Image (cartoon, rainbow, N blue to C red):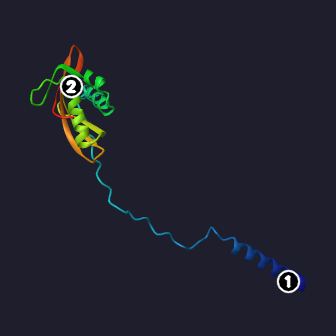
Amino acid sequence: MKRSILLSISICLLALLLVACNDQGSSTSQVAPATPTATPSTPTPAPTFAPNAVQSMPIAVGYYQALKMKDYDTAYTYLSADAKTQDGQPLTKEVMINMARTAIDSYGPISTITMLPESSDGTQIVTTIDRNTDIHYHSHLTLKKEQGHWKIIMIDRI
């Protein structure tokens, strides 16, 4: 009988040891509740434009991409034959190239360009031009449809 009591006590101790070493499910530690780090901000709605307002944008994008690549022949194809500068000077190919080179010499090459329509009919576009020299400025384009194709008819600066 002594032997069975000793065996029972040994089994109980062994069972207690196994339960104590393997007790992961009944933890009494508590996790602190999550606290917000900042109050959520109200989202800013993206601007929406009338379809007509953006239909001339590819012309302005193509024009400035060609200028950025110094492909003046291609850039000139986006201009109307009667395009003018802001002060009324005819915007010939030579005048356009001179404006582009003066801008590069004065401010450095174009790094990025962003555009927004300024009118609901696609005739006015405002560009923000960033130069590699940390110069940022606006340029204003006026466009019109000629024989079904958009053309730039006035530009104030490159």
Q: Name the residue beneath numbered marker 1.
A: 6
Q: Amino acid at mark 2?
A: Glu
Where is residue 42? Give x, y as percent: 28, 51
Residue drawn at point x = 23 percent, y = 15 percent: 148
* Quarter of the image with the N terminus in it: bottom right
Q: Secondary structure at mark 2?
A: helix
Residue drawn at point x = 82 percent, y = 80 percent: 10
Tell us which disc is closer to us: 1 or 2.
2
* Quarter of the image with the C terminus in it: top left
Foreground pick, 44 / 128: 128
Question: What crowding class fits label 1: few (fewer than 14 Cα within 10 Å), some (14-19), or many (20 or more)?
Answer: few
Residue 108 versus residue 123 in the image, above or below: below
What is the spatial separation of the Cα atoms under label 1 and label 2, in whole angstroms? 110 Å
Foreground pick, 93 / 79: 93
Foreground pick, 79 / 29: 79
- Kindly tell me whether residue 122 is visible in this rendering: no
Q: Amino acid at mark 1?
A: Leu
Question: What crowding class fits label 2: few (fewer than 14 Cα within 10 Å), some (14-19), or many (20 or more)?
Answer: few
State the count of labels: 2
Q: Name the residue beneath numbered marker 2.
A: 94
Q: Is residue 76 left or right of residue 89?
A: right
Where is residue 33? Give x, y as percent: 44, 67
